[in-house]
Image (tube, rainbow, N blue to C red):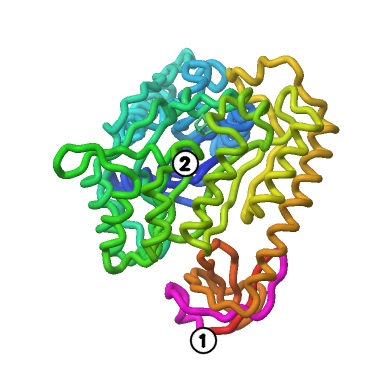
Amino acid sequence: MVLFHLKTFGCQMNVYDSSRIVGLLAEHNMEPTEDETNADIIILNTCYIREKASAKIFSELGRLNKLYLRLKGKSPVFAVIGCVAKAEGENIFKRAPFVSIVLSSQKYHLLPELLKKALAEKEIIAKENVDNKKGKKTKLSHLINTELSGLEKFACLPVTKNTEKIAFVQVQEGCDKFCTYCVVPNTRGREISRTEKDVLEEVNNLQKLGAVEINLLGQNVDCYNGLDENGEKSSLAKLIKKIAKFENVKRIRYTTSYPSEFSDEMIELHATEPKLMPLVYLPIQAGSNEVLHKMNRRYTKEQYLELASKLKNANPNIQISSDFIVGFPNETEEDFEQTLDIVRKVKFIQCYAFKYSPRPNTVAAKMDGQIDLKIKSDRLKRLQTELRKSQDAFNKSCIGKVMSVLFTDISKVDDGYIIGKNEYLQPVIVKADTKLVGTIQNIKIESASYANLKGKII
Ligand code: SF4
């Protein structure tokens, strides 16, 4: 049996890709190992979203190669896949010549064959090098495919064998929005959607294997427009309605939304479909229209507020989470105040806030008016304080309420307690029989801290 060690960097999409890669390689007699020192193959599934992402990957490659040379006197087959592979291409071989395979995320279905080729070649070369009296080393081939090829990979993947209660299904990939700070349109390509049939088959299989919560993934999931059974373009709302019909599926989530693509059909669905969780992840990034324009985000603060209020009117249980970037080039104090203002108005929960950092080959990285790190840090701190206030207030408002919780783990800290997530992805801890892990229970919330809620089963 060939052992591979797969390391995943970045977003939920990469985590999903990695889980499909494990299934794919299993069909070719390759088994995953957690032990990074004992693998025949090392695969890095990479992310390019942050500054210095490539540097991190090259340093990880160097570290692992040295580790093997020290321990075993030889290195495994190295494969770099995903967004850094797409962005850096041939450059990876120049900087890390011991790497054999470089593949974009839309080509990972080719991985088994390329790995077999590299393993076979490595064996021949090892033998040749032993026989070679002059001590001249033969070099490994460099196998590369960084094309973006749409939906091809999905057709080549084996049926997933994931038996987790919470399952992820990619429905859409790529992005046409070209936000000025983002690398995704270059690394993941243009928007493409899987057909409804393809998605529904995967969901059906997952729910038969035990999944009760389905998370639909897409860089721009609101733009889902895969073909339906009649060859017509579908929509995210139509797809969700079909998924909700599977009896074992109890909860449906989707991510990531783009505010100006969020449809009335989806707003209505949030009012009528109980399986659709009432937490809407709707990244705004900034509250100033000037900054939004420079980011090439195609909505205004006013349009965002209108959408938030439409959602909350359609379903008063809805809460909104968001991403924020502070210190975007030329962001003034007044611009930043607009971000604080929208946080106070929308009362977001479960947010992520970051200091702007230039991403390679993006428009914003070349803009004048880059903001001093001290100012960025100060703004981030002030934003986090404001976000914490609304999270705290929401957590406290949960006390006394009955919430539905999907339990997934046994507490490692508190003996006899189990942990799960409620509708709003808040961690909830209760004292209960560990047999309840994997089930959904109604919990009366009795106390709340910033980090979690505690309650009892009713
Ligand atoms: S919408 Fe903007 S931030 Fe999101 S993936 Fe597309 S380009 Fe990147």
- The x, y position of residue 189, in whole percent, is 41, 26
User: Residue at 81% across / 38% down in the picture?
Assistant: 377
* Amino acid found under the numbered disc labelled 2: Asn
Q: Is residue 444 magenta?
A: yes
Q: Which portion, as a residue range, is magenta?
A: 431-450
Q: Secondary structure at mark 1?
A: loop
| Left or right of residue 277, residue 115 in this image | left
Q: Tell me if I can see residue 349 in this picture.
A: yes
Q: Which residue is mark 2?
A: 14
User: Residue at 72% across / 35% down in the picture?
Assistant: 326
In which image quadrant can residue 40 be found? top left
Q: Is residue 428 magenta?
A: no
- The x, y position of residue 177, in whole percent, is 48, 27
- Number of marks drawn: 2
User: Residue at 48% across / 61% down in the picture?
Assistant: 315
Q: Which residue is mark 1?
A: 458
Of 327 and 57, the residue lying toward us: 327
